[in-house]
Each structure stands twice: as C-alpha cells, then as structure tokens.
Amino acid sequence: MTAILAVSNRKGGSGKTTTAVNLAAEWGARGRRVLLVDLDTQGHAGLGFGVVARRDEPTAHHVFSRPGFALDDAIRPTASPNVAVAPADPLFDGTDVADRSVAALRRQLGAPAIRARFDLVILDTPPSLDLILVNALVAADSVLIPMIPHALSAEGVRQLTRLFFRVATTVNGGLTLAGLLPVMLNPRTTHHRDTLQEVGTEFGVERLLSGIRSDIQLAEAFASRQPIRDHAPRSRGAADYRVLADELAGLWTGAPKRQPHEIRQS
Ligand SMILES: Nc1ncnc2c1ncn2[C@@H]1O[C@H](COP(=O)(O)OP(=O)(O)O)[C@@H](O)[C@H]1O
Ligand SMILES: [Mg+2]
C-alpha cells in the first residue's frame, strides 16, 4: 500500500518544503521508495534535489493543465537513493486548469504504475487555498502541518485545519492529521515555549511533534541543492529530521501512537 502525506500550511515560509525534502531523503535512505510531488509553482521542492523542469518538460502541474496527462511522465530520479521527484511548473498560473475536479490528483496517484513503484508519496503544497491544495488534501491519507511557533502562526494553522475537517468530513473520510510540526524552534525562547503551550491547548498536545530546531545549515543545504542528511549529516537539522521520520513511522506501519510532546532542550 502506498501512503500519501501532504505537507501543508496556509502560510508561506513555514518550513513546508524543507520538511517535504528532508523527510523524503530520510525515508529514501531507510529503504522506502519515495515520490515527492512538487505542487508549489515556486518549484523549491524539486530544487532541493537539484531537479528543475525546463520549458515544455512534463511537470506535476500538467495533471491539472493537460487533459489525459499521466503523472508518471513527470517523474524523475534524484541523486538521493530511492527518491524520485515530480517537479513543479513555474509557468502554471491556475487559469489554465483543464481539470477542475478535486479528485484529479487522487486518480493519478491511484494509477497502478505509481502504486507499484512507490511506498510513499509526499505532496509539497502551495500556501494558497486553491484547487491544488484541495486536490492534495483529497489525495492524501495524512496531513503534516509545519508551523513557526509564533503568535501570528495560529491563524494559518486554523485555516488549514478548517479545510482539513471539511475535506475529511466529505470527499476524503480517510484523511488523518499526522501532526503539527514546530519548525525553526528555539526551545530556550520563552515565547516559543508559550506559543507551543497555547497551540497544544488549542489543537491537542498529542498532535504536537517534537519539532525541528532552528538551523542555518537547513537553508545552506537547500542552497546547495541537497538534503540536510547529505549536506551536513551531523547537524541539528539532520538529527531533528531523523527524529521526525521516527515519530511518523507509525503512519506507515500502524505502530502505536507516539508519546505526548515534550519540549526538547537544545
Ligand atoms: N529549521 C529551520 N531553521 C532555519 N531555517 C529554516 C528552517 N526550516 C526552514 N528554514 C528556511 O526558512 C525558509 C522557508 O522555509 P520553506 O521550507 O521554504 O517554507 P515554505 O515551503 O513553507 O514556504 C527557507 O529559506 C528555509 O531554508
Ligand atoms: Mg514551499
């Protein structure tokens, strides 16, 4: 069975792409066959692995703009073991959507060619509340919501969770919340601790994952077009994404739920 994880938040700059790229690399290194689908026209998820679609090359967005297109044609290998990428179309602007169905992506990911080739599909999503994001939530089994623990972040999470519940109570009854992932975390900052406490109270402490500490090497890894585990394997960022991959392992194995959140001291 192929598991499908959407990484989403209404806010830009909340660590979605960094999380999608580094989880893909981590799980790939652990022997899972991973497909990363870049649904944000900025194309950063593909870029994180050094993959860019040139003009007229097939992309993930062609699922929406070209009737009869097969996602399979957009899939490319990366230098990371077991990780393939379907890059984004930077020219896609939402006005050239031929297939307005909310289930277009779900149909594509259900194709035997994809199911047979991959254990996991990770969807990196755009911040806008548009057809693409809805398609991702309709296609997914689980949603992971990265967020910066800051007072202003709660609204982006609320908007996403509203959409999550709308999709989970209508078209995609199987959709679950993989968790809220605090990113760019500085556990020594009282503001971060206070915000996490509030987020825990509002959304449930059992939904809070340990989180990813602030680490400039994550930005440097992206600039060098490599996942953190290759760029700086001994960094904080690499360690935290390993822990996250462990915490989310239950998504694929049905293992028991993790322990409630503890704020990690750096
Ligand atoms: N834990 C972190 N520590 C430091 N910088 C980070 C961290 N996570 C992400 N970044 C940086 O923050 C910026 C936004 O992250 P990104 O993953 O692109 O967010 P999004 O996809 O939600 O827009 C990028 O420059 C990225 O390198
Ligand atoms: Mg992004």
Image (cartoon, helix red, strand yellow):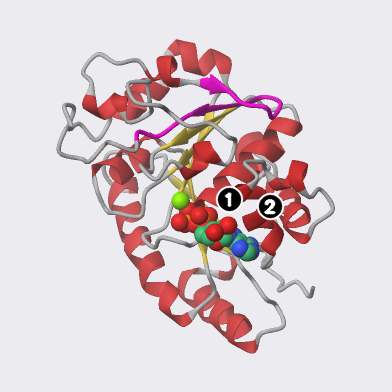
Whether label 2 touches label 1, CB < 8 Å: yes
Q: Is residue 29 left or right of residue 198?
A: right
Task: Judge from the rendering whether residue 151 lies leftward or rightward of residue 168; answer left or right.
Answer: right
Q: What span is in magenta?
A: 76-89
Name the kind of residue labelled 2 in the image: Leu
Q: Pointer 2: what residue?
A: 244
Residue at left 47%, top 32%? 52
Give the residue drawn at x 42%, y 73%: 154
Position of the C terminus, as image quadrant, is bottom right
Q: Secondary structure at mark 2?
A: helix
Image quarter for ligand 1 = bottom right
84 falls in the magenta region: yes
Counting from the top left corner in percent of width and height, residue 62 is at 30, 25
Q: Which mark is residue 19?
A: 1
Task: Determine if the C-beta at disc 1 is less than 8 A from ligand 1.
Answer: yes
Secondary element under disc 1, as helix, strand or loop, is helix
